[in-house]
Image (cartoon, rainbow, N blue to C red):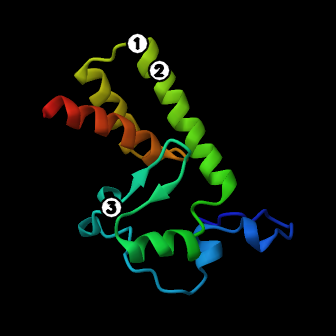
Amino acid sequence: CTGGEEYGKKTAPSTHHCDTKKKNEDFCINPADAHSNMESRLKYLRDGTIESSDTQLNDQINKILNLNYSLLKSNRAGVLNALKTIFEKRRLKRSQLQKLLLNWETPPYEPYCQTAISSPKKKLSRCDS
């Protein structure tokens, strides 16, 4: 994505993220490669931070992609808070969680869909235990 760019406007480099920030730098993982298991390497914290236990990936998330830029963190936290509200108001059944996941995992993808997907997946994995 062309993160932080606005068509026809000059934007501050500190707001750049994703491909705009990355430019031609190498990234340790190709997220488009299905074998990379990118999603399993990431953790979404309640404040919207993305982190990885893989130190190289974690470093590149922050320095090369700038994915913990304050606006992105705030937007991801908003998604997580909205899901928390939904889960607290309704006791969703396993089949309802699976339907939510299917909707979010099916193109066209919505912004922050991976953030939204992570929460029901955690709930489902706890059900399987």
- Image quarter hosting the N terminus: bottom right
Tell me which label, 3 or 1, sits earlier in the chain.
Answer: 3
How far apart, in angstroms, are the residues tagged by discs 3 and 2?
26 Å
For badge 1, the amino acid type reads: Arg
- Residue 34 sits in which quadrant? bottom left
For disc 2, the marked residue is 86
Instruction: Say if 5 sits above or below 102 in the image.
Output: below
Instruction: Say if 122 sits above or below 27 in the image.
Output: above
Q: Within 10 angstroms of label 1, few (less than 14), some, or many (20 or more) residues?
A: few
- Image quarter hosting the C terminus: top left
Residue furthest to the left in view is 129
> Could you tell me if the residues under marks 3 and 1 are in contact, i.e. CB atoms within 8 Å?
no
Q: Is residue 44 left or right of residue 38?
A: right
Tell me which label, 3 or 2, sits earlier in the chain.
Answer: 3
How far apart, in angstroms, are the residues tagged by discs 2 and 1?
6 Å
Which residue shows up at 21% across the image and 37% down it?
Answer: 125
Mark 1, secondary structure of its residue = loop
For disc 1, the marked residue is 90
For badge 3, the amino acid type reads: Arg
- Residue 81 sits in which quadrant? top right
Which residue shows up at 45% across the image and 60% down it?
Answer: 51
Q: Position of residue 98 (x, y in %)?
A: 27, 30
Q: Position of residue 74 (x, y in %)?
A: 64, 45
For badge 2, the amino acid type reads: Ile
Q: Position of residue 43 (x, y in %)?
A: 39, 53
For disc 3, the marked residue is 41
Instruction: Say if 118 sits above or below 83 in the image.
Output: below
| Front residue of this view, candidates 119 and 3 | 119
